[in-house]
């Protein structure tokens, strides 16, 4: 088999070694584990794509510690008992680097033998653990699928500022920054910009960080996370947004399904079930034996119950809840013409937890003035944002997926900090 250009330039990735049975190849990685049995030395070599067994009857000179990086030239042969069904024999090792310090943890041991704080404190090393590394490979594949689904539908990728002059959601949960002597904020979302760009490019998406200064120290909140945003023009209502989101979620799940254990694979029907916010409260009132009809939002325990109910009722791990009270949604949310107190908005619950928020936005300038005035917000403060609507905008809407929350729910990770490379929360700024 001919090598790709990348394989010709770099050592062969371990995941591709099996394609070269009966050939001499060159690969590279970390010494993961060494054991000696009856005069034979077995070496496990690790790179970002997997493990491969190397077998030699010659002594390792010099002896190589775990986490030594090496270049290996060897012959590839089948061995059903070895990882991946192959092994490398007659190896020649070239040491690239040797560890300066003893490793803080043996990466051949299960990850859950350590405390989360230890894993986070030693993240530059602990992220090498094959299990934890797999989490972020799944995250990467999920993002690629998100992009692919939208590109196929004519969306264009954008990159918007993360330092803003106003708070996107007009709330208090923002990080102020010094910007050449002026007051500025880290972006809570690309919301304003992706709406503006619907008037330029029709369909846009962005993958980028967002910042929330919410004083929450929970297993489901972060101060910085990755948001997968999309916005589209010329929609009829929020149901068009929900249809696009369904296609995106289906492609994201499909992209990673081969990496998931059967128990992790979500139940995802062709059409995700939809209930209204009022219906949700009615079901919850019966389930919790109390009157919840006056609630304006869903509490975490309510979302969890709805997740179980959707799985039992619709055989779906996903559930749309639409028509949230307008008072609980941002000022740019389009009202429901049939229910003045309701909105053309939705949440998508995934296994009993909010994963996506989206909906139709206001698109007429006068409606924005009225909405801002009703909430006692300054129209002048949002002047540059409102400029797009002053000169005409099509009906539009969009959604935002929290990447880390998607990965955590997909893999059954209890604490979202285990689904982000270097988490930022109320207490952690390092590493």
Image (cartoon, grey):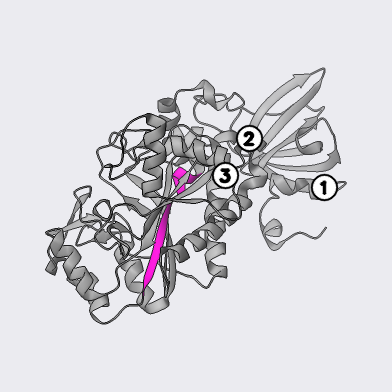
Q: Which residues are magenta?
A: 395-406
Q: Which residue is mark 1?
A: 24
Mark pair 3, 1: CA separation: 53 Å
Mark pair 2, 3: CA separation: 18 Å
Which residue is found at the position 17% from the left and 70% from the top? 369
Task: Classify mark 3: helix, strand or loop.
Answer: helix
Task: Classify mark 1: helix, strand or loop.
Answer: strand
Mark pair 1, 2: CA separation: 39 Å
Farthest residue to the bottom: give it. 391
Q: Which residue is mark 2?
A: 263
Q: Which residue is mark 3?
A: 314
Give the number of the disc on residue 305.
none
The answer to whether residue 70 of the structure is visible from this angle is no
N-terminal of the pair, mark 3 or mark 1, is: 1
Q: Position of residue 97 (x, y in %)?
A: 57, 38
The residue mark sitting in front, 2 or 3, is: 3
């Amino acid at each position: 088999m001919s090598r790709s250009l990348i394989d010709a330039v770099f050592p062969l990735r371990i995941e591709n070694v099996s394609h070269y049975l009966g050939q001499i190849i060159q690969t590279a990685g970390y010494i993961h584990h060494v054991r000696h049995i009856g005069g034979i030395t077995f070496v496990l070599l690790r790179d970002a794509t997997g493990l491969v067994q190397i077998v030699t009857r010659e002594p390792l000179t010099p002896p190589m510690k775990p986490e030594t990086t090496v270049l290996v030239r060897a012959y590839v042969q089948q061995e059903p008992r070895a990882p991946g069904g192959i092994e490398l024999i007659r190896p020649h090792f070239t040491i690239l680097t040797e560890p300066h310090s003893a490793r803080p943890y043996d990466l051949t041991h299960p990850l859950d033998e350590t405390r989360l704080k230890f894993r986070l404190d030693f993240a530059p090393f602990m992220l090498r653990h094959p299990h934890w590394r797999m989490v972020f490979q799944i995250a990467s594949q999920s993002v690629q699928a998100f992009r692919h689904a939208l590109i196929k539908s004519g969306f264009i990728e954008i990159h918007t500022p993360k330092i803003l002059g106003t708070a996107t959601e007009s709330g208090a949960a923002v990080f102020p920054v010094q910007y050449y002597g002026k007051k500025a904020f880290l972006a809570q979302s690309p919301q304003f910009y992706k709406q503006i760009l619907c008037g330029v490019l029709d369909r846009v998406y962005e993958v980028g960080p967002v910042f929330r200064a919410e004083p929450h120290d929970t297993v489901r909140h972060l101060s910085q996370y990755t948001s997968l945003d999309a916005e589209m023009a010329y929609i009829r209502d929020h149901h068009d947004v929900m249809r696009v989101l369904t296609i995106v979620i289906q492609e994201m799940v499909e992209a990673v399904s081969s990496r998931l254990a059967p128990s992790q694979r979500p139940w995802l029907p062709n059409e995700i079930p939809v209930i209204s916010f009022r219906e949700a409260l009615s079901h919850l009132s019966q389930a919790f034996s109390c009157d919840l009809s006056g609630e304006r939002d869903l509490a975490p325990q309510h979302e969890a119950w709805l997740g179980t109910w959707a799985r039992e009722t619709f055989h779906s791990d996903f559930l749309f809840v639409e028509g949230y009270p307008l008072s609980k949604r941002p000022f740019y949310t389009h009202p429901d013409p049939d229910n003045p107190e309701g909105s053309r908005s939705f949440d998508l619950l995934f296994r009993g937890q909010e994963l996506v928020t989206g909906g139709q936005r206001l698109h007429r300038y006068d409606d924005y003035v009225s909405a801002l005035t009703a909430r006692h917000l300054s129209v002048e403060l949002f002047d540059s944002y409102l400029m797009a609507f002053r000169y005409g905008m099509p009906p539009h809407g969009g959604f935002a997926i929290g990447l880390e929350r998607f990965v955590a729910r997909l893999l059954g990770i209890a604490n979202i900090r285990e689904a982000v490379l270097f988490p930022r929360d109320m207490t952690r700024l390092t590493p």
